[in-house]
């Protein structure tokens, strides 16, 4: 493996770890790089799960230390999320990536409209919703989110944030902490599915995870110290960039190819 590939894996990991912890959607960068490096789509999807596990482990620990993580609610919501993720990972072994990327792009743009149109909904938590017991509807919603996260993971953070903010009443900072905790809960299970089906390139995955760890730690500090409005604008920017990639307006794969050829 050349030093250029190592540098690309670590640098992209740093960026992805930061984006995924603070908002979501950064996984498209990882997948694009892995595909350029010659991995099949299913292996690229599986290899990315190594970094997902480590970045959420680091960011969860940081959020917990800063006392913004609702562990109890996270564990309860984590049960349907984990169950859904395992089923999704099993489905992902034969992945049709392009169709789902475009569908995610549409959903992300719709979510951005809600974020811009009613910012107070995302910036301020609703105590009455937080204090309520978890409903059957919430269990169903997070099962579906887990299903999607296990399947492809790209953009799953937005769905989790929507469920936690709009349905469970958390502000964006606390929702972000819960988001990475929920992903941490299901990440080991989906990783096992991909390992069992031999869909992982350990060399690329572990090197990529080095950058992810650093990016996750930095982002978890920014999220708390800069507040919910900062997170909101980061989400808007990342949704625009990610949607542009998914509709072919921006080509991360081509960018990586040009960089590594130099």
Image (tube, helix red, strand yellow):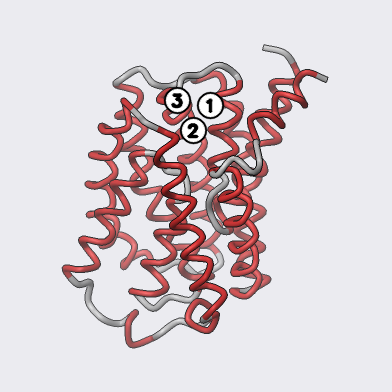
- Quadrant placement of the C terminus: top right
- Quadrant placement of the N terminus: top right
Snapshot quadrant of residue 166: bottom left
Q: Residue at x 57, y 75 (%)?
A: 116
Q: CA distance from mark 2 to mark 1?
A: 6 Å
Q: Residue at x 38, y 86 (%)?
A: 127
Residue 15: x, y in percent? Answer: 66, 44
Front residue of this view, candidates 211 and 243: 243
Residue 226: x, y in percent? Answer: 68, 71
Q: Which mark is residue 25?
A: none
Q: Earlier in the sequence, mark 3 or mark 1?
A: 3
Residue bearing the label numbered 3? 41
Q: Earlier in the sequence, mark 3 or mark 2?
A: 3
Q: Secondary structure at mark 1?
A: helix
Q: Against 132, is 206 above or below?
A: above
Residue 164: x, y in percent? Answer: 39, 69
Q: Secondary structure at mark 2?
A: helix
Residue bearing the label numbered 1? 205
> Label 2 crowding class (10 Å Cα cut-off): few <14, some 14-19, many 20+?
many
Tell me whether circle 2 and circle 1 mark residues in contact (CB < 8 Å): yes
Q: Residue at x 63, y 75 (%)?
A: 229
Is 35 displayed left or right of 188 in the figure? right
> Label 3 crowding class (10 Å Cα cut-off): few <14, some 14-19, many 20+?
many
Snapshot quadrant of residue 41: top left
Q: Secondary structure at mark 3?
A: helix
Q: Residue at x 59, y 74 (%)?
A: 228
Number of numbered labels in the structure image = 3
Q: Which mark is residue 48?
A: 2
Q: Against 161, is 86 above or below?
A: above
Q: Earlier in the sequence, mark 2 or mark 1?
A: 2
């Amino acid at each position: 493996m050349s030093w250029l590939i190592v540098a690309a894996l670590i640098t992209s990991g740093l960026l992805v770890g930061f984006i995924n912890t603070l908002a979501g959607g950064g996984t498209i960068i990882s997948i694009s790089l892995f595909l350029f490096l010659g991995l099949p789509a299913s292996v690229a999807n599986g290899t990315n799960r190594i970094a997902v596990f480590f970045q959420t482990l680091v960011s969860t620990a940081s959020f917990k230390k800063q006392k913004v993580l609702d562990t109890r609610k996270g564990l309860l919501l984590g049960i349907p999320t984990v169950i859904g993720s395992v089923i999704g990972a099993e489905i992902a072994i034969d992945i049709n990536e392009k169709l789902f990327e475009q569908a995610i792009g549409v959903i992300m743009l719709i979510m951005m409209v809600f974020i811009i149109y009613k910012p107070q909904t995302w910036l301020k938590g609703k105590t009455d919703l937080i204090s309520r017991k978890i409903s059957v509807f919430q269990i169903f919603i997070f099962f579906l989110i887990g299903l999607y996260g296990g399947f492809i993971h790209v953009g799953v953070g937005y769905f989790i944030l929507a469920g936690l903010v709009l349905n469970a009443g958390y502000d964006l900072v606390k929702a972000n902490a819960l988001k990475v905790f929920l992903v941490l809960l299901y990440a080991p299970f989906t990783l096992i599915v991909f390992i069992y089906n031999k869909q992982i390139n350990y060399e690329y995955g572990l090197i990529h995870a080095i950058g992810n760890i650093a990016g996750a730690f930095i982002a978890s500090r920014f999220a708390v110290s800069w507040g919910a409005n900062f997170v909101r604008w980061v989400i808007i920017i990342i949704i625009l960039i990610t949607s542009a990639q998914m509709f072919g307006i921006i080509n991360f794969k081509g960018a990586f190819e040009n960089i590594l050829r130099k």
